[in-house]
Image (spheres, rainbow, N blue to C red):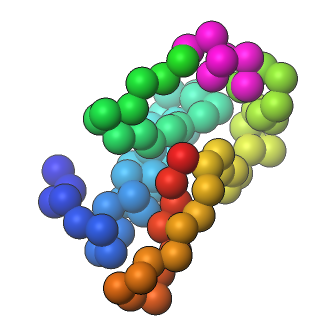
């Protein structure tokens, strides 16, 4: 369980765990979304089929935009 935080590696920890799960179960993709996100599954599956390469060619891919923090010297990913 990772405590809620913005600058202390919550997303990094999640993706490290996700990469372990992906290797264990032979998954090509791991995603992280907020709990208030609605995923349009037909569009997501079309995007995966048409635009994303399978493992191992899909490392460090991101779908979304980057937003600079006004408070600290960080860039946040949103999308």
Q: Position of residue 69 (x, y in %)?
A: 44, 78
- Occupied quadrant, residue 54: top right
- Occupied quadrant, residue 9: bottom left
- Residue that extends furthest to the top in the rendered view of this protein: 42
**In magenta segment, residue 42:** yes
Measured along the vertical axis of the image, is residue 46 above or below residue 16? Answer: above
Is residue 52 something that shows in the picture? yes
Per the picture, the main secondary structure of the magenta-coloured stretch is: helix
Q: In this view, does 62 lie to the left or right of 3?
A: right
Q: Where is residue 8 in the image (x, y as percent from the top left)?
A: 30, 74
Total numbered labels:
0
Q: Where is residue 4 in the image (x, y as percent from the top left)?
A: 19, 59
Is residue 20 something that shows in the picture? no
Q: Which residue is drawn at the image coordinates 61% and 56% (left, top)? A: 65
Q: What residue span does the magenta drawing correspond to?
A: 41-47
Q: Which residue is drawn at the image coordinates 59% and 64% (left, top)? A: 66
């Amino acid at each position: 369980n990772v405590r809620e935080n913005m600058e202390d590696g919550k997303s990094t920890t999640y993706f490290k765990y996700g990469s372990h799960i992906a290797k264990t179960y032979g998954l090509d993709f791991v995603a992280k979304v907020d709990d208030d996100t609605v995923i349009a599954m037909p569009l997501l599956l079309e995007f995966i089929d048409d635009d994303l390469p399978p493992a191992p060619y899909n490392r460090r891919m991101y779908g979304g935009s980057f937003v600079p923090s006004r408070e600290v010297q960080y860039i946040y990913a949103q999308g």
